[in-house]
Image (tube, grey):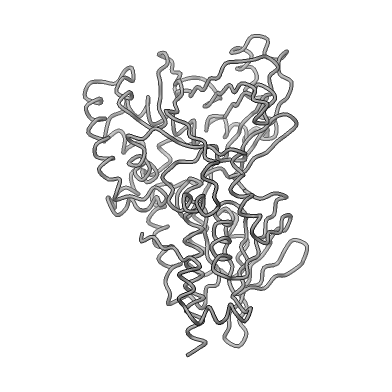
């Protein structure tokens, strides 16, 4: 997909829009959702001189890129890391002068615990991956060849757009990640290297996903060693953006309806309190599985796309621990009878707002399903406490705080076939021939990539579509 960026300078070269803006008649836009996708779209539109209002149902901005606190326990609302390859996100960081807030984390790894012992597993693969115990020689050689192929595709795939893999291999969308790795490298690499990472960092089993995410991100990870977190918390970027925009928190949109008067299509957004906002354009930046309930008169392409969006859920228990513990991160292999896929010990860091030692315990995909079936999503501590007692002596005596975190929509599921549907949807959404009758534009990780950088890129692209429509409408008005 060709990347577009419409800045204020680009827009200034269009005299019809400049004239409208000078008269105070810039197009109005309502952005629904204040995650990184919605705020990026709003910021780019605001830069271009449009009148933008952001609506957020929650009491704080950020969505799944934020920070939360319960007593002395600090935790993330979703995203925990920033990958360095996000071009749209990096532009945003530069524009906001937040480069100094990026904290590098180098050579991030975990101990993968299996029924046969444990081994080092790297989030950004290097030659050390060849030392993984149990890999047959044939798979070690295949791993080398695979890494070279991935590295060679770096310039051909965009890590912020999962569907860019279709330009390299149209069959990538039909192949599950599990089948792809078995064919490319072998079953041992799947079980020892790929599967633990996807289960522990993304709460997905590789047989449920297509190969798109892997094939667009790994080329940009091979040979690299650094990811980032943010000084001040993961919510820093969203809060900085919101500080420059008109954002209404606690404002839940319940419907979006097209209205046509004198051949002019506008959009009415109704809120839960009965208030209505009218605008020339709407950017819908909520999770795709929720967007379908908002749009009152969707066209066929919208209805079909929104009906296809699925998310996984995520369950995490955060414990405040009175006893000092060393830093530790473990991933659990699928062959272990454990409900915990990621176990992390984080020593107290009072200067960073973490006065207690904290334990981060993320459920396996199977335990997530179990919590849903048993109806204990608000008390998932009950599922894993016995296991923790066996791990840590006097566990109950040292626990001084417990936070159960349930994220019902953590990451979009790019299942086999989803990529082709999404590519067709973007073509439909960007088609200028239908622009006058479609004032709603969609963005979010479900439209791009299951990463915060992908969500950011989709917000930038949504803004570009709105600005293109504004320019087109201005030209029609003048002529």
Q: What residue is rendered at 71% in x and 26% in y?
A: 402
Tell me where residue 136 appears, x and y as whole percent: 25, 20
Tell me where residue 166 appears, x and y as whole percent: 32, 53
Given the current orientation, which residue lies at the most extreme right position? 273
Query: Does 344 appear above or below 92?
Result: above
On the picture, is 149 further left or further right than 391?
Answer: left
On the picture, is 165 further left or further right than 446?
Answer: left
Tell me where residue 432 appears, x and y as whole percent: 43, 74
Q: Which is more toward the observer, 155 or 265?
A: 155
Q: What residue is rendered at 70% in x and 34% in y?
A: 378
Q: What residue is rendered at 57% in x and 86% in y?
A: 263
- Name the image quarter holding residue 340: top right
Q: Which is more toward the observer, 426 or 53?
A: 53
Given the current orientation, which residue lies at the most extreme top position? 393
* Quadrant, the N terminus: bottom left
Query: Does 44 appear above or below 136?
Result: below
Question: How many numbered badges does the structure rendering display?
Answer: 0
Query: Does 69 appear above or below 387?
Result: below
Q: Which is more toward the observer, 362 or 478?
A: 478
- Name the image quarter holding residue 20: bottom right
């Amino acid at each position: 997909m060709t990347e577009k960026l419409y800045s204020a300078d680009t827009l200034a070269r269009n005299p019809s829009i400049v004239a409208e803006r000078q008269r105070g008649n810039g197009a109005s836009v309502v952005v629904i959702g204040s995650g990184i996708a919605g705020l990026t779209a709003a910021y780019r539109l605001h830069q271009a001189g449009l009148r933008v209002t952001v609506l957020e149902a929650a009491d704080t901005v950020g969505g799944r890129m934020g920070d939360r606190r319960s007593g002395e326990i600090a935790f993330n609302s979703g995203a925990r890391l920033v990958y360095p390859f996000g071009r749209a996100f990096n532009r945003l960081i530069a524009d906001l002068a937040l480069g100094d807030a990026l904290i590098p984390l180098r050579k991030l790894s975990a101990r993968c615990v299996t029924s046969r012992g444990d081994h080092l597993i790297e989030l950004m693969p290097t030659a050390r991956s060849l030392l993984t115990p149990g890999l047959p020689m044939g798979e070690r050689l295949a791993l080398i060849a695979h890494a070279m192929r991935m590295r060679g595709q770096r310039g051909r795939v965009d890590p912020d757009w999962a569907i860019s893999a279709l330009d390299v291999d149209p069959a990538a969308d039909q192949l599950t990640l599990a089948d792809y790795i078995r064919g490319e490298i072998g079953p041992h690499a799947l079980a020892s290297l790929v599967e633990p990472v996807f289960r522990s960092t993304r709460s997905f089993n590789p047989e449920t996903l297509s190969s798109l995410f892997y094939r667009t991100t790994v080329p940009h990870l091979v040979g690299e060693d650094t990811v980032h977190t943010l000084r001040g918390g993961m919510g820093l970027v969203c809060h900085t953006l919101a500080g420059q925009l008109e954002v209404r928190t606690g404002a839940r949109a319940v419907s979006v309806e097209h209205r046509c008067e004198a051949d002019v299509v506008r959009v009415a957004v109704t809120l839960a309190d009965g208030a209505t906002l009218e605008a020339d354009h709407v950017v819908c930046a909520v999770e795709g599985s929720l967007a379908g309930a908002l749009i009152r008169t969707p066209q066929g392409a919208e209805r079909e796309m929104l009906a296809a969006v699925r998310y996984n859920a995520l369950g995490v228990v955060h414990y405040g621990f009175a006893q000092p513990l060393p830093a530790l991160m473990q991933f659990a292999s699928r062959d272990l009878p454990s409900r915990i896929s990621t176990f992390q010990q984080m020593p107290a860091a009072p200067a960073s707002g973490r006065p207690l030692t904290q334990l981060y315990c993320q459920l396996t995909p199977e335990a997530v399903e179990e919590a849903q079936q048993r109806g204990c999503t608000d008390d998932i501590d009950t599922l894993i406490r016995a296991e923790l007692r066996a791990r840590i002596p006097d566990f109950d005596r040292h626990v001084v705080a417990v936070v159960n975190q349930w994220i019902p929509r953590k990451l979009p599921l790019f299942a086999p076939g989803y990529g082709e549907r999404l590519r067709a949807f973007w073509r439909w959404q960007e088609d200028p021939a239908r622009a006058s009758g479609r004032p709603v534009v969609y963005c979010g990780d479900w439209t791009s990539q299951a990463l915060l950088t992908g969500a950011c890129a989709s917000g930038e692209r949504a803004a570009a579509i709105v600005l293109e429509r504004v320019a087109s409408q201005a030209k029609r008005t003048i002529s």
